[in-house]
Image (cartoon, grey):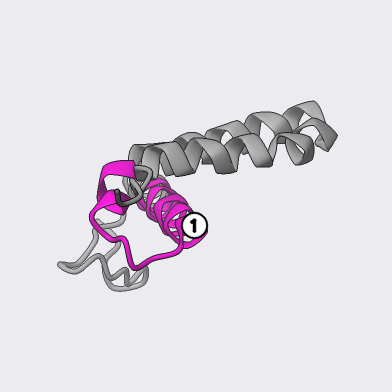
Amino acid sequence: MGRTVPSFRVLLESIVLELAVFRRALRAEDRTAFDTIMNMARRHASSSTVAPILDPMDSMFLSILIEQQKEIKHLQEALDVSFGYTVRPGGQHNYVLDKKE
């Protein structure tokens, strides 16, 4: 009989468990950040499941980067609104030319 390939979610949780020693060595504020990025990886587990050619750690890193990029974009948009800038299509900023008058 053939071997069953574990799902990405199972692999992800096993990686998180392997990193538990590292997590315990972190300061409390860093543990919170660590937990946040592990949750970022969990949000994209279904996408990683359909990309079996990627190493599980690579999938985790890509998932975390995607979530961080979304956060950066959200923060940039909030700053633009607070400073009165407009954003050109494609997300390009020109702070000199795009200033709302």
* Secondary structure of residue under mark 1: helix
* 79 and 97: which is toward the camera: 79
Describe residue 88's horizontal placement relative to residue 6 as left or right.
left
Q: Position of residue 71 (x, y in %)?
A: 41, 46
**Badge 1, how many Cα within 10 Å: few under 14, some, many 20+?**
some
Prevailing SS of the magenta stretch? helix
| Residue 58 is one of the magenta-drawn residues | yes
Q: Depth check: 95 or 40 in front?
A: 40
Identify the residue under disc 1: 61
Quadrant in the picture for residue 9: top left
In percent of the image, x 39 and y 65: which residue is there? 54
Residue at image position (40%, 47%) is 67
Q: Quadrant of residue 29?
A: top right
In percent of width and height, residue 62 lies at 42, 59
Tell me residue 80's x, y (percent).
35, 51
Q: Is residue 32 above or below residue 83?
A: above
Q: Nearer the viewer, residue 94 or 71?
A: 71
Span shown in magenta: 45-73
